[in-house]
Image: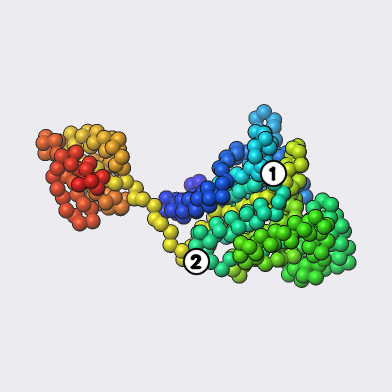
Amino acid sequence: MYQAPRGTSDILPEEHPYWTYIEEKASELCRLHGYRRIETPVFEDARLFIRGVGEGTDIVEKEMYTFEDRGGDLMTLRPEGTAPVCRAYLEHGMHNLPQPVRLYYIAPIFRYERPQAGRYRQHQQFGFEAIGEGDPALDAEVIDMAWQLFARLGLKGLYLVLNSIGCPKCRPGYLAQLRSYYGKIAAGLCPDCQARLERNPLRLLDCKREACQTAAESAPRSVDYLCPECHEHFQRLRVYLDLLKLPYQINHRLVRGLDYYTRTVFEVQPEGEGAQSTLGGGGRYDGLIEELGGRPTPAVGFAAGIERMVLNLKRQGISIPQGPPAADVYLAHVGQGAKERAVELASWLRGNGVGAILSGSSRSLKAQLRQANALGVAHALILGEDEVKRGTVILRDMARGEQQVMTPEQALQALRGVV
Ligand code: AMP
């Protein structure tokens, strides 16, 4: 028997109300803030991510699904949402529009990771990006939206953590301090961190091993090495966040797994769990568009995994609206003549806006009604040879077990709730 590939899952109809709920809340949030939906292809030129996300990152080094297509081009299944949106921004000349351009997406993401609870090889991300403006008021808007998203979903006990990791002007000085600090204690670090020390020292700060965590606590802090412009940006952002009454905490060890971040980085985390279970994260990426061949263009964004939202909704016992029933009416039939009439009637009902499921079998009426019950359909239309002859139908209220003989028009009115 075949199974879904490791690290992937099927979202069955029973589960779907969670997804609908989240997507509706997300879309509503975006509408309220003037963000418009964009969809980009599931795969892109591999170089987009190698350049955009950064060669030294875990994503590019170990996690991308990259393949050569039949034409010999190297393609990668989208491992994150921001670089494709920036590619589309450039390709469609969106820099000519009033800035910033506000966009959002709901899209599958592919990463070859070690599967565990809340970590999959294919997951779905909701993300939004504001491209073309560097003002910290926009960072505040994006952070506020991220926070509002989870509030609207009804999730409680979350933490908003914030940091500033500087820009290409001030970061090298900070990285030199980090290297010097960690260089002195390198022997006590885990092998991964020893390897990161030269290539990507920022990542040492969020290593999950205990020895490295202890070392990170006393490590130099990026906020102490910001250039005056980055310092000012961070201070102003904090003023806006205070105006919005957002309960953020500064975490000096917060860095993100992608190279493109500058200045602001932030995450929303659930209670009592580490960054492994982060609900969503984002930040400013002022260098990315230029890296992809555009003019220098500041931007800021956020993304969150839908599976983790579902997980947290369940964990917190939050009840969500159940979806509509499978249909409004189930058509049961006995005999070939009745079956033919039922085929016609089902089509006619649907044409009139009534959801109709046609019994697919010629089993006993009892078995057909049992199926109607199992599907949770509130009404059944029953057709036998007598009904065909008289041009009538039997409308059955499934919950009450009451039946009435009537014309198809009367049944339509009743099903529409007009009578
Ligand atoms: P990132 O693109 O790494 O910043 O991730 C953004 C968000 O996507 C995370 O906070 C998670 O909610 C979600 N996410 C990232 N990787 C995975 C994964 N492998 N499985 C499920 N959700 C993920």
Q: Is residue 307 visible?
A: yes
The type of colouring in the image is: rainbow
Q: Amino acid at mark 2?
A: Gln
Q: Amino acid at mark 1?
A: Gly
Q: What residue is rendered at 66% in x and 42% in y? A: 99
From the top left corner, tell me how far across and down residue 120 is, in percent. Answer: 59, 53
In front: label 1 or label 2: 1
Above or below: residue 380 compared with residue 176: above
Choose the circle earlier in sequence order: 1 or 2.
1
Q: Secondary structure at mark 2?
A: loop
Category of crowding for the residue at label 1, using alpha-carbon neighbours closer than 10 angstroms: few (below 14), some (14–19), many (at least 20): many
Quadrant in which residue 93 is drawn: top right
Q: What residue is rendered at 60% in x and 44% in y? A: 103
Q: Tell me the distance, in whole angstroms, between the alpha carbons under discs 1 and 2.
A: 38 Å
Quadrant in which residue 268 is drawn: bottom right
Residue 316: mark in rendering: 2
From the top left corner, tell me how far across and down residue 394 is, in percent. Answer: 16, 44
